[in-house]
Image (tube, rainbow, N blue to C red):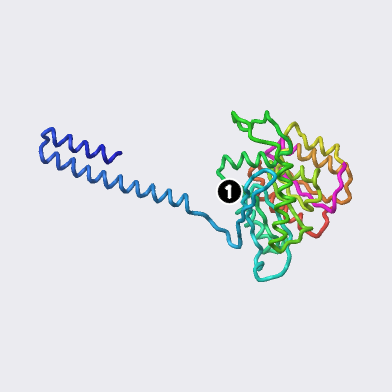
Amino acid sequence: MNKHIIIVFVIFLTSCGIPQSEFDLVKNENNALKKRIDSIEHQLNTLEYLVDNSEVVLANTKVKELTSTYNGQSYKIKIKFPKGYENGSEKYPVLYVLDAETNFGGVSYIVQRLIKDKLIPKVLIVGIAYGTDYDDFYKLRSRDLTPVEDKNLRIGGKQYVDPTGGAPEFTNFLESELFPFIAKNYRVKEEERAIYGHSYGGLYGCYIMLKKPHLFNKYLLLSPSLWFKDNLLIKEAKETELNLKPTKLYMASGMLETRIQNLQMDFVFTLNSKRQKNLELKVDVMRNETHRTVFGPGFTNGLRYLYSEKKEQ
């Protein structure tokens, strides 16, 4: 389009009897502008190529795709193997990670450093992602990680309501499709499953503990969104007769997220009041941490607690 305008402008100048010197000047400027446009177009094409084709690949990882028959969703399953996996026969505990769309790199790095310092055993990480853009990711996690539908929920001033209430179907996907896939294809200890979740992921972890406690024996839950549906899961925790196998739970929130911190303590108080002999529980409220910054210290401390063989008093 711009090239055509320039050419038409040059023809117009020639037809108006412009002196040759001025015409040559415009012609040179036209050629320089054309080169500049060509350069910009080349840069844009290069940038588009890099956006479409560039990706960061973590060492010792694979990505598989599973489509659930329960909700029709196609999931990107990100798998991080411990060092030495390829050449051995050992079976490993599994750490299932929610929201792997955004956190898989950070999770993998922290796990790797803790293993290297012998602070946790070698584990196989399974991240659950969607392979979609930012907006769709938040809609899909809202659907999968909330226990019931809330048609009135609006977050962050949104004019629309994100889908909610898909946790039962997502849980069926985990139990009947993902777990068997991992057990069939990789060397894992099926009795050693941990789950990590933050925010809605923390809410989902609480839901699983109440509804299907046999699925995991370790829970690392940060800043759980227990405010959802008027504190629904806190109410259900009070009414639920827990039947836990030996289980460890680590919960943490930031001191700078007052509402979530208070609801977390309500949930923990409810669990403690049930005097579950099979439950080991630790809760932290972290100084100077917010809903987003709690990840680093919370995830690190949580792993060290969950995989420690010592009982804390």
Which span of residues is magenta-colored? 241-262
* Residue 276 falls left or right of residue 60: right
* Residue 102 falls left or right of residue 235: left
Crowd band around label 1 with a 10 angstrom C-alpha radius: few (<14), some (14–19), many (20+): some
- Residue 247 counted in the magenta span: yes
- Residue 155 counted in the magenta span: no
Residue 138 position, x and y percent, is 61, 40
Inspect the image, locate mark 1, and give the three-letter code of the amino acid beneath it: Gly
Residue 15 position, x and y percent, is 13, 34
The quadrant in which residue 226 appears is top right
Question: Is residue 19 visible in the rendered structure shown here?
Answer: yes
* Residue 62 or residue 285, whichever sits in front: 62
The quadrant in which residue 309 appears is bottom right
* Residue 280 or residue 155, whichever sits in front: 155
Residue 199 position, x and y percent, is 68, 42
Count of numbered tags: 1
Question: Is residue 157 visible in the rendered structure shown here?
Answer: no
Q: Which residue is mark 1?
A: 131
Residue drawn at x 40%, y 51% is: 46
**Which element is circle 1 on?**
loop
Q: Residue furthest front?
A: 69
Name the quadrant of the N terminus. top left
Residue 67 position, x and y percent, is 64, 49
121 up-or-down from 73: above or below: below
